[in-house]
Image (cartoon, helix red, strand yellow):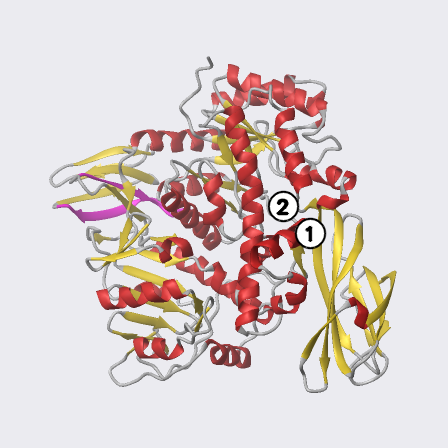
Amino acid sequence: MTQFKDSKQTMGLFLTPDWLHDYSDMEEALVEAAKGGFGIIIGFARHMRQTVLDAEVRAAIKHAAETSHELGMKFALDMDWCHWANISVEREPEMALWQLVSEGGACHNGQFELCVKYEGKAPVVVEEISAVFAWDAEGKVHVLSPDDYECDQSSFASDFAWPSLDDDQAVSLHKPRGMGYYCKLNGRIKAGNYTRVRVYLAMRSSKYPDVSSPEYLRVQSDLLSFYNDVPMDGVGWDEPGKGGSMRGHKAGKSFLAKFQEKYGYDLRERLLDLDVGESHTAVQTRRDYYAALVEMNFQAQNAFNQQARAQYGEDAFLGTHHTYSGMPMDIRCGVMDYFKLGEVLSAAFTDTGWDVTRHAETVYNYTLVDSLRKELGKPLSYVNDWSKKPRTVWYDYYTRLKMLYRIEWFMIFLGRHCENFPTFPWDPYWKDVTRNAEQLESFRETLPSDLSVHSEMAVWFSWESQVCHERSWGHYVRLWVTCNYNLAEQGLEHSRFFDYVSTAALENAEVRDGQIIISGQSYRRLTLPYASMVSAAIWDKLKACREAGIELIFIGPPPSRLWDKEVPIDQDFAEWAGVKRVNAAEYDAVLKSQRPVPSMTDWEPDKADFRFPVTAESGTECLKDIEGDTIGVRRKNVTWFSNLDPRENFYKHLASCAEGVPAVTHYGKAYYRWYASSDSETAVLVCIAPMYAVLHESFDAKESRFRLEGGTWGMLQVNRSDVTLLLGDSGTQLLS
């Protein structure tokens, strides 16, 4: 039986075409990984004509797994369908993914002409006209059946203006956003007087599968069986939600059938509700649709991973991250419920880049993975860190930053070809990779497993509140992400940490003894960013928190309605916060009148400075920024930051300091966090220096006064009368 290393540090192995014929170069990479202290290798077969479906790839993977075992490392294989499923889709079109793409325009005397841009990079065909909606002169919407209209289709490519019907004139010039391939619809409504029409086309792609289809589920099962005799220790799904679009809605023949079976209606008849309107029916449709997307991805990956467990053992490594390309795209892909989807994995996972994203995004992803680990009860957490232009200072800084969130090493660039990233172990930064991975492993081994990191508050991770609004509210997803990025980064700057909690966990939380207990963690403070819609269960929980004296903090658009009942809550919230009644629609109108808002295809702004002009009632405290402007209100234990992104003002205006955290006197800029257990007087303090900084900190904690000098990080054991430096870099000194 193979004796594996205990190391949990993970490295990806990119298969190179040459390695299909000569394994020596691959062996050299694996040997260097073993010398570098890595304990887990994940194989990636990408960007080659051959895929994991081919015998040559399978043979190379088998050799990589056997070599890894000889070197004491475990081996898992990434089987992300994005790099192989197109072959199966071409053979079995029934399992193809659809994009439901819409276009609207004028209707004159029953005639309409629309040009819909094809969606997808692979061969795409129009599978069906999924729905046609028409507006009469009074503005009422009608759902047209195929018998109500006739329509001719043609296709053309264009990078210049082409004619189309318009509201004000029979013919106008419409300019495409660039070179594109279009489906042109010339239609006639047989009866009735309509002024506008919107058509939804199902565009079938030969590249992506509908992972809910029986055909796809059979193919993924066959794939695992194909690797049955390869001695692997797990599998991976890197970003399994691909295939989304900001222009369309993911679906498929099987998906639509299963949707109707579960929810009792044909989604085609309500497609307009996914984009337009704030009625209870529209909100319900969006909630059903996005929940169905999550369930589709969950069921597919769960079936695959359960089979992998049966094949490779109950302790199989099952990864990787569901985070893909930012929350708006993750929503369209149906992978935004990281908590639900994380249940099928063996550890908590997220992903972030060091040089193409800002620091706040990395801190947010570290916070998120720490929260996933806690709520899901996972033993480990990983963040796939990457950089196209690495620097030693980045490796050193982001590695020690992981110590504050109990994150292991995970990088995927072992190989000769790594998607234009550094190619290890031949890149000169390999020494930084191995040094930092070994450092994290030492940290993991030294830190007592029964100690948990302190978090002073819970923050609701409310993707549901965002998707329930119509598409015109899409900019709030961008702004919600900005707010969360800055909330996490400011928490790090103040060494005050929080845990994200899912909707399900919050709904099932218990309020007791002035605390809210969520997934076994206790908090006296709960923050809800952009909670304009909440479920009835959450609203009842917030009522109980308010009565129990738990601090409730709201940010951005005010709570206005429930998403599962046709009940307004804006008056209740106004009384809680001590302000004049205001709802989310009024908030939105003021925002749009004063500030430009990002579209769904923009990226998140670095900050959002909009301030909503609240009208405070008598007895309500107004919160001010450094310039004296009102940024929110507080009444008793309810605080509302009425601006979109409070940033540094958030921690400045918290009602009290973090409970249970020893007082710290700063004369440096270090970040620190406490690890402790509820039944021990001993705690571990982890203190790190920011990027380009050196540790210079004094502490007053547990009746002990001490200083850390020099170096970049230190790990100390602290009890009532004794302080011990457990770990640190060569320059770190403990001065009593």
> Residue tagged by mark 1?
252
**Residue at image coords 50%, 54%:** 358
Measured from the top left, where is residue 645 in percent x and y? 43, 67
**Residue at image coords 65%, 35%:** 218
* Residue 140 vertical placement versus 119 (above, below): below
Q: Earlier in the sequence, mark 2 or mark 1?
A: 2
Q: Amino acid at mark 2?
A: Ser
Circle 1 — which element?
A: loop
Residue 623 is covered by the magenta coloring: no
User: Quick one: label 2, few (<14), some, or many (20+) residues within 10 Å?
Assistant: many
Total marks placed: 2
Q: Amino acid at mark 1?
A: Gly
- State the separation of the CA atoms marked 2 and 1: 8 Å
Measured from the top left, where is residue 189 in percent x and y? 82, 75
> Residue tagged by mark 2?
212
User: Quick one: label 1, few (<14), some, or many (20+) residues within 10 Å?
Assistant: many
603 and 687: which is toward the camera: 603
- What range of the chain is rendered magenta? 682-702
138 and 437: which is toward the camera: 138
Check if mark 2's residue and mark 1's residue have beta carbons within 8 Å: yes
Measured from the top left, where is residue 368 in percent x and y? 43, 49
Quarter of the rendering containing residue 65: top right
Answer with left or right where residue 214 lies relative to residue 650: right
